[in-house]
Amino acid sequence: MEIFDLGAQLRSNSYPGRGIVIGRSADDKSAVIAYFIMGRSENSRNRIFAETEDGIRTEAFDPSKMVDPSLIIYHPVRVYEGATIVTNGDQTDTVRDGLAAGKSYIEALRTRQFEPDGPNYTPRISAVVEPNGAYELSILKSFDGDPACNKRFFFEYDAPRAGLGHFIHTYMGDGSPLPSFEGEPETVRIEGDLNEFADMVWDNLNEENKVSLYVSFIDLETGKASSIIRNKHC
């Protein structure tokens, strides 16, 4: 198994788009979550993360400059009965509502597909972190850019290892159209405490394209979450 340096992975890709990292802290005491967004257009860059009662929401930094809120304004993180849901779109609500109706996250995501933003057809990436630290990741993507064919992949990790996590992102790099993520989530090292890990991720994201970052360490014994938000627009 190849284990990647997360900072190096971020530095090597000027435009991974939106990304999710889920794993376990090096001291084996916390579940670790990171979610970031990037942007190439003025509309995409005109965003911040803001706290909500059960997670975070994207908002316009300057509402007067918001052109089209579809696909860029949503709840990336919501907590439901101890489970933390993290996604790159409004499927956060789909998963949350599915869990509330007694369905699994897989059943909920089978009702969704990639984003309708041709020619990119951006993948929908999602994660659910259970109270015990076990987690699931998924990606819904088009078949080689074909909007008539949707592919769904689900990855489950029921015994996370200390100091390791998994990283999934929307794009393999910059381009036109943007190339969708391929393969399994990348195994990455998770080092440092909350502040150190957040600084490492933020500092290694492309300076021009990065927009916002959310990082949370959830104490596995108490369930208490400690979180940090970084916004390029402060």
Image: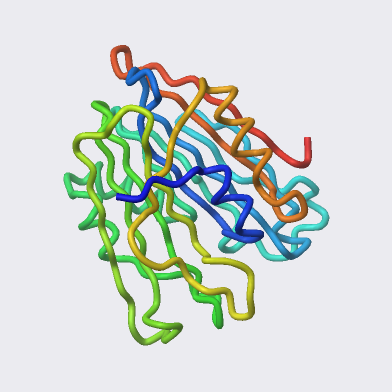
**Picture quarter containing residue 119?**
bottom right
The front one of 189 and 42 is 189
At x 29%, y 67%, the residue is: 152
Q: Is residue 189 above or below residue 40?
A: above
Question: Furthest-top residue in view?
Answer: 222
At x 25%, y 50%, the residue is: 105
At x 61%, y 59%, the residue is: 13
**Picture quarter containing residue 100?**
top left
The front one of 212 and 23 is 23
Image quarter of the C terminus: top right
Give the x, y percent position of residue 195: 59, 22
Q: Is residue 44 above or below residue 119?
A: above
At x 39%, y 23%, the residue is: 26
**Picture quarter containing residue 146?**
bottom left
Relative to residue 46, is residue 111 drawn left or right? left
The front one of 162 and 180 is 162
The front one of 108 and 26 is 26
